[in-house]
Image (cartoon, rainbow, N blue to C red):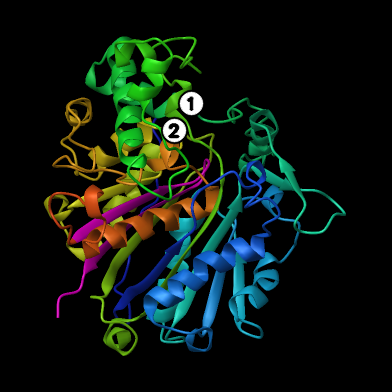
Amino acid sequence: MNTVVNQTKLHPYSRSVSIIGVGCTPFMNTVDDPETEGLTEGELFGYATMEAMQDAGVSPKDVDFYFHGQAAPMGSDYITPNIMAANWVGMKGKGSIHHSEACCTGYLALEQAVNAVASGKYNVVLSGCVEFGDAIAIPYKPACFRRKMPMNEFLETTRWIYDKAYTLGMMAGPVINFDDSAEYYARTYGLSVDEMDTVICHMALNNRYNAVHHSLAIVKEDFPEIAKKAGYENIMDYMKSDRENPKMGEYLRLLGTEIKCDGAAAVIVCPTEMASQFTDQKPIEVLGIGSACLESSNHNLEIHATREAVRQVYELTGVTPEEIDLMYINDFMIPSQLVAAEIAGYLPEGEGWKYISEGRTRFDGDRPINTNGGRTSFGHAHAASGLADLYEAVHQMRGDCGERQVKKLPKTVMLRGFGGSQNVTAAIIRTKEA
């Protein structure tokens, strides 16, 4: 079935906007650790946003407006959680907006902030996202009381993604998308089920390799170590084991899906011309952000929406795929990584699976993707994940990632966001030279 997508023409920002500060908490399971059990969402949001302000060299009084993002209503016990966070970050009385776009919330958090500054209305804007993806508020209890949210209970909430008027009735809205992008890729480029399975396993291996080198990632142990403890000498035997890594459909396996968790992240933006007033760091300019939305009754919705968002931002900025040095892709279903990288031209069409299988997309490869480990190994604190990717991108662009620094200092980076069965974004950011 062909899907015709409306096209949007973007226009340049009224003034240049740059990122001057980022913050991110560890991604974690708060209720599993006595040190973090009892954290409120205001505190979690506060930790990330205060780090971003410190990084930017601004105080709460310098911030003119703030955005608060959270992916889904089950994560909060408030109807206006942005207000509940104000006192934690010194923002009492400041104007703010709460927004929610499922797993694309963090990527659109950047767009909200950039638009607010580009319009000329505000000079310094904070945008933060917080999510308890692994814990849920207990009704009628104080905010510090949460309980574990098992995966089967979480999956029930994904019905909120779909149009209840007709999509669910037509059985077009499954509980969650599994094999759509993998099936599309295998069919388009002639890979067998086993070959596609191998590629998906390699993506999971690469993500885990990246994550175990990152101090904020939820995982701490690499797959080869885990496989050896389980009695497997060959890592691919472990990755293809129906006991250790069962299939969830025809292609996707358990280790190719998100690790839901709790976390928060934040960003500070200001007019590029003002950046030097606050920080000695080189500002990172937001060149443009493309956006598209499709819901689940549209066949291959992620592919179509990604093409449109990427088209928009390339057309607006004049940047070419060859200029992209590093890419981040929201891969809560890991095949997204492959299809989005090829649509963006970051990996060659129909050949990207070879780069992945050869380890070239690891942080120490020549075409790095998701240097933090992505959703399957860094963790997925749904709303916060997009800004966690931005946090990682900024630090890689500054060159301060130590042993996990990519080989070539990236100047131009693309971040492709995707949320549920709806929003897709493509943002291009670039280090601003003096």
For the residue pair 281 and 93, the one nearer the viewer reads as: 281
Q: Which residue lies under the disc numbered 2?
A: 333
- In percent of width and height, residue 410 lies at 18, 57
Q: CA distance from mark 1 to mark 2?
A: 7 Å
Mark 2 secondary-structure assignment:
loop
Mark 1 secondary-structure assignment:
loop
The residue segment tinted magenta is 412-434
Query: Would residue 64 appear left or right of 394 to someone viewing this image?
Result: right
Q: What's the amino acid at mark 2?
A: Met
Q: Which residue lies under the disc numbered 1?
A: 178
- In percent of width and height, residue 73 lies at 69, 51
Whether residue 407 is in magenta: the answer is no
Predominant secondary structure, magenta span: strand
Q: What's the amino acid at mark 1?
A: Phe
Q: Is residue 398 above or below residue 140?
A: below
Whether residue 414 is in magenta: the answer is yes
Query: Would residue 239 appear left or right of 188 to someone viewing this image?
Result: right
